[in-house]
Image (cartoon, grey):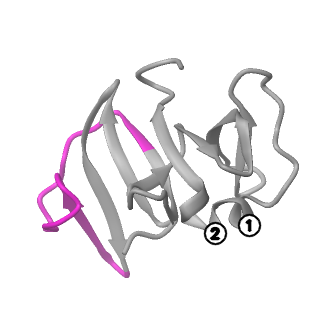
């Protein structure tokens, strides 16, 4: 199970693996299935929300999602390091969604991953 202490690793728009910190150990995986201590070279990292969508896809910052509660909207998951929390930003209007991200993502049956902000636009 991933938590908000786990990261997706990228080189530009290419996902190269994942990183997890457990105590004093840093583990890496290329697939989310097998973890080891062999470092993976990367340029960017995206923080995991600790939540999945309805297809059991882990959600990270920079993912674009939709919800059955708000079917006409798409949201970019962002992480604000100053506030130390995740925010949802309306993809088309650029406005911050004013509800709890945790409440929004809690029922994965309502959430659908669409694409990555760093690869495509919708």
Seen as rendered, the residue at the extreme top is: 121
Quarter where residue 64 is shown? top right
Left or right of 76: which side holds 52?
A: left
Left or right of 37: which side holds 80?
A: right
Please give the label number shown on residue 48.
none
| Majority secondary structure in the magenta region | loop
| Membership of 48 in magenta stretch | no
| Residue 33: x %, y % from top left | 17, 66
With respect to residue 7, does 66 lie above or below? Answer: above
Callout 1–callout 2 Cβ contact below 8 Å? yes
Image quadrant containing the N terminus? bottom left
Please give the label number shown on residue 106.
2
| Residue 61: x %, y % from top left | 54, 45
**Residue corresponding to mark 1:** 103
- Magenta stretch in the rendered image: 23-45
| Residue 6: x %, y % from top left | 41, 62
Gap in angstroms between the C-alphas marked 1 and 2: 5 Å
62 or 39: nearer the eye?
62
Left or right of 66: which side holds 85?
A: right
Quarter where residue 11 is shown? top left
């Amino acid at each position: 199970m991933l938590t908000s202490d786990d990261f997706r690793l990228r080189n530009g728009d290419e996902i190269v693996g994942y990183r997890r910190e457990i105590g004093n150990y840093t583990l890496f995986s290329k697939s989310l299935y097998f973890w080891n201590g062999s470092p993976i070279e990367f340029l960017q990292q995206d923080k995991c929300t600790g939540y999945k969508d309805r297809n059991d896809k882990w959600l990270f910052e920079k993912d674009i999602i939709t919800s059955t509660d708000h079917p006409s909207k798409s949201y970019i998951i962002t992480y604000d390091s100053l506030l130390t929390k995740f925010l949802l930003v309306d993809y088309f209007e650029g406005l911050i969604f004013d509800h709890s991200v945790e409440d929004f993502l809690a029922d994965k049956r309502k959430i659908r991953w669409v694409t990555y902000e760093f690869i495509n636009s919708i």
